Amino acid sequence: MSQYQLRVYTLCSAEALGAYETIWSKHIPGLAKHRITTHGVWTGPETSGSEAPQLYALVSYRHADNVTERLQAYLASPEFRADMEGFDISQIVDVAESVLTPTADSPLQ
């Protein structure tokens, strides 16, 4: 059974969200190289008020892999540095990570 992780990135503006969407499309091959599978990347609907724009990514890791080690290996990789080139990382104001365990009947195992 795979290990799933929902990653939620909160950006400082709609423009930053648009730029980060482009970056995430670049992340997918690099993540795969580090045994992290991307199942989907989404943005939520825009709402009025003070809610900051967010990008959601559902990724998985092999059952036996250490999630923290796999992610750290990717973050230290030349692929990650190349993907992030020209993007001001301070535009990401928060990253929330939740490990998800599939139920017995879940199509994603």
Image: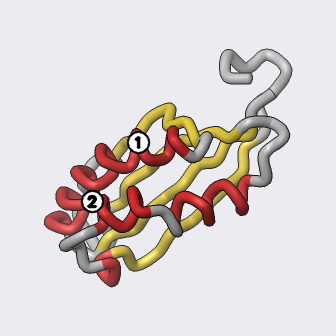
Question: Which residue occupies the foreground of this view, 71 or 9?
Answer: 71
Question: Which residue occupies the foreground of this view, 36 or 41?
Answer: 36
Quarter of the image for residue 35 reads top right
Q: Residue furthest front?
A: 78
| Residue lying at 49% horizontally and 46% vertically, measured from the top left | 31
- Name which of mark 1 and mark 2 comes first in the sequence: 2
Instruction: Answer few, some or many: residues within 10 Å of disc 1's Cα (few below 14, many 20 plus, some between 14 and 19).
Output: some
Mark 2 sits on what residue?
Answer: 20
| Residue lying at 25% horizontally and 79% vertically, measured from the top left | 88
Q: Tags 1 and 2 in contact by the CB under 8 Å rule?
A: no
Q: Position of residue 70 (x, y in %)?
A: 66, 54
Q: Position of residue 105 (x, y in %)?
A: 79, 16
Mark identifier at residue 3: none
Q: Quick check: 2 above or below 54? A: above
Looking at the rendered structure, the kind of residue marked 2 is Tyr
| Residue lying at 54% horizontally and 58% vertically, measured from the top left | 74
Rendering colour mode: secondary structure
Mark identifier at residue 28: 1
